[in-house]
Image (cartoon, coloured by chain):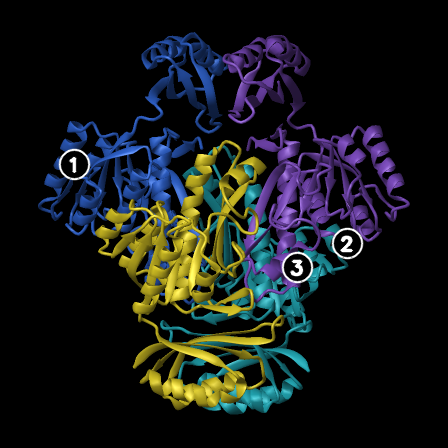
Chain colours: A purple, B blue, C yellow, D cyan
């Protein structure tokens, strides 16, 4: 028996859960976990089903047949198949180090195929974890080349997830479109609080009592993509901008790792500009 | 159409979800929310389904027929039907005040039918909320009478939930057995940390950095019933026992209110000495 | 011996703590708690000292003499003297109920002298707590009268703190100026995230994973006054705007109560547009 | 000017703060941060003062002279002098990896002089961070040798802090005594909840809704030393013991790192079996 994950979404209609579960019975499957949600805003139905079944293809066929009339889109994944992942980075090590460590520790069901950076400072770290590392300065002149290279790697290696682990560069609208729904960014602020540059300085000036981090899908609308995960931590008047940065980096690492885990376990579905998260 | 909640549990077997959802289709129902869980420890299957259906009785019949072979026990409730509730209290007002206020504000789907206390200090508060209030000193001599009166009220008023809102008295094993699965206590500590009396003093002596509260089902094994909800709050060395008490009372009120809400929305199922909570 | 609180601020200079503690020794006082902070941003020194001393006037004289050369401003309060407080409210009961309950329970060292509202729905609640209650519709025509009345009450009763407990009306710049540094508002959002009206709807549309509340000093720059306290709570995609409101109201009540407690215990000092909080 | 930290404790008496701040003035110092606490339980006075001064020795002399009559013990440290640290480890990498990464990132003012382990699995990690690594199986026969070696390293390298980063072995009473006040352990549970072995299994069996971690000083009374820091995280019924372990390890790493930071910044003072933490 295989341990599979079925995710499916379609316009909500009576009988949809019964149709899906019928297909599972027919494919010889046994449900171990099921979550579903009907969005009153979009009228869309979402489900994530974890199940044991003898054959993934047979399950796909049964679900396709049973849900043909519902206009459903669905995916079936092996729950232990690691998600092919590419990291984009710059100089900051904390988020990359955290992802690599958790991956190697078996906490994240991903397979990090490479790190592409616009600086070389993370080369040793990548080497320690045996991950291919390439770097190249990103300037107005070279940006298109860098992005073309990202695209080539994504296509050649069949990358399923691109993680901007404090990459610090804005992606072109074309690359955003190409990576739609499969690129996650960590914004070092509790959105929509402090968008743009230097959020820790902004937070310090404003004298806030909590700072946070937001992991979201990348869209061409900067810092406005669908939110996957957010965290905050308490701060106070004694903390300099440097201390806020340090406190915030912990939040960034954890928030990004959690978003990557949710994605890699196929727990994140898109509902227009919002996300449905089946924890 | 009625807005109904179906909760069901039985030994886990393939096909159970399909059988239940088939019964719902047959009864003309449409699922709006479904959660399920199969316990690898007990081998038990649990589900909570919220649905629109034309008739509760017809749904009950369909589910009974479809799940007869599975050894299932199930309940169907109107999701807006308030749960008939009795509060047991003593002198402390915070938990009672919080429950009454949230109830009147529409936050808790309960109907508080009465407050029974071993002191009279909460009489005014009960009066303000128009809740019948009775009090009677509980001593070794009168305890059996008090408990008999609780039992009488539960039976006459068909009480579904008894809440020990800092009642401070230990129930007899007989009353525990009578109220099994329908009485919730708030323990003013983060169990299993500090059982028994004066947990705040224990916490102070031990110099802990967090204190908490635990809402749990009442069993004859004191402070050991299945846990429904827990919360903690940060404390420090400057805080006296009195300050810990004050901080802790906020946790007690919120934790108890959350446990009552979960119960009254039929989100709490029992899995031996653990709880399954469908949030 | 009296239990006193001394708060003082002045431009930072070497020797200031020694000068102050010398004055305390001279006035026969014994320090039980001392906190200080030098702001690297504003170059200002802040301290809060709790002490036992035989006489408040003698302490005032000694501190005035010792700090004359430092350009200090300071206050001495009896630590158990309740702060004279006026509540402004509208229809929402949660924040008002919470403040009144905590006040009566001895948790907040305030004395609620009255509630002024633009609706009459809280009259019974005020009555239960024996607090004078006045109400008067606030329209463009009557707003100036209402505010003049607030001003009259503040002056006649020597009110030290005005709490906007979900008052829902914007104060005129004149009233803001009159109440500068002694009026606290609760904003039903995690500022600076969602300013203005309907923050819960904004939060729902944006699909955030945390919502919060912010207590801040009232200034004429709406929702931009110095922040005193903030809290957040986790939310998810299943929650309607109504549920967000309910979850958020808990945060509002607690956040406002905490800000009032900090103010009433003389733990909040102003550092330009930021606050120094001595917890 | 040097940036120094003065920590001092003595029986509480009026005038102590004035005496200390006088010594600082005399030594040409300027206070930038001061915290103090008088314990009503033990009658002990504690303070931590951060200051700029021209000379550490001159400050020591001035403080010694001024506080001679108070029976004070005190220490003066350069606030940027890293604390010489030795790690004891076993097979688990998470806590060690986290400490090394934060140290190298400049977050922890420590200097990791070595890692001693009873297994060799962390050798590569130590190598990556250029930290001397020794390992040796610890059995009833070799334990005394291992501990003698720890003692030798501590003495030869003048180690100020020993961190048990999931070392998993119980130290002998002799070594506990030798390291008293300078050895920190991370217990993978929210003490005093689940002492001893397999706390995650205990937590799972009990069905708790929160799990946590506790960093505490090592004493011969196992899991009972003075607590420095604690954290918890929410868990639910769906989580296996393995998932609890994974969630808990995040808490362990963070809690231990925070305790090490507090110690290395001289923010932890001992008040009998409790700690005074000046954050």
Residue C96 picture location, percent across and down = 34, 51
Q: Nearer the viewer, mark 2 or mark 1?
A: 1
Residues at badges 2 and 1 in contact (C-beta under 8 Å)?
A: no
The mark found on residue D63 in the picture is none
Eye-nearest disc, 1 or 3:
3
Q: Is residue C89 visible?
A: yes
Q: Chain of mark 1?
A: B
Q: Residues within 10 Å of mark 2 (few under 14, many from 20)?
A: few
The CA distance from mark 1 to mark 3 is 60 Å
Asked if one can make out residue C257 in the rendered structure from this viewpoint, the answer is: no
- A123 relative to B144, above or below: below
Disc 3: CA contacts within 10 A as few (<14), some (14-19) or many (>=20): some
Mark 1 is surrounded, within 10 Å at the Cα level, by few (under 14), some (14 to 19) or many (20 or more) other residues, namely some
Q: Which chain does the numbered disc 3 sit on?
A: A
A58 on left or right of C85: right
Q: Position of residue A122 (x, y in %)?
A: 80, 51
Label 3, secondary structure: give it.
helix
Q: In the rendered view of the protein, which quadrant contains the N terminus of chain B?
A: top left
Say which residue appears at 19% left-offset and 39% top-offset.
Answer: B131
Q: Quadrant of residue A215?
A: top right
Answer yes or no: are tags 2 and 3 on the same subunit. Answer: no
**Which residue carries the number 3 mark?**
A201
Q: CA distance from mark 2 to mark 3?
A: 33 Å
Q: Residue at x 44, y 71 (%)?
A: D271
Mark 2–mark 1 Cα distance, whole angstroms, equals: 67 Å
Q: Position of residue B271 (x, y in %)?
A: 39, 29
- Name the residue that disc number 2 marks: D128
- Does residue C190 sit above or below A53 in this rendering? below
Which residue position is annotated with label 1?
B150
View extreme (front): residue: C141
């Amino acid at each position: 028996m295989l341990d599979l994950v079925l995710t499916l979404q379609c316009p909500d209609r009576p009988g949809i859960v019964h149709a899906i579960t019928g297909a599972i019975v027919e494919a010889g499957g046994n449900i171990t976990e099921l979550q579903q949600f009907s969005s009153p805003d979009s009228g869309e139905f979402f489900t994530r089903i974890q199940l044991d079944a003898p054959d993934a293809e047979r399950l796909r066929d049964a679900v396709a047949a049973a849900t043909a009339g519902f206009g459903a889109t669905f995916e079936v994944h092996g729950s232990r198949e690691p998600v092919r992942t590419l990291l984009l980075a710059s100089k900051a090590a904390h988020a990359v180090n955290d992802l690599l460590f958790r991956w190697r520790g078996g906490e994240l069901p991903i397979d990090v195929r490479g790190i592409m950076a616009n600086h070389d400072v993370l080369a040793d770290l990548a080497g320690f974890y045996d991950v291919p590392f390439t770097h190249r300065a990103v300037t107005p002149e070279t940006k298109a080349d860098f992005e073309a290279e990202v695209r080539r790697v994504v296509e050649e290696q069949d990358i399923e997830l691109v993680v901007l682990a404090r990459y610090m560069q804005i992606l072109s609208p074309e690359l955003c479109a190409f990576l739609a729904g499969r690129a996650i960014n960590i914004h070092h602020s509790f959105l929509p609080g402090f968008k743009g540059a230097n959020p820790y300085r902004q937070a310090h000036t404003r004298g806030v009592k909590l700072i946070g981090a937001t992991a979201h899908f990348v869209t061409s609308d900067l810092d406005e993509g669908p939110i996957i995960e957010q965290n905050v931590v308490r701060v106070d008047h004694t903390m300099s901008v440097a201390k806020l940065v340090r406190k915030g980096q912990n939040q960034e690492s954890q928030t990004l790792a959690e978003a990557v885990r949710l994605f890699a376990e196929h727990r994140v579905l898109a509902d227009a500009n919002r996300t449905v998260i089946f924890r």
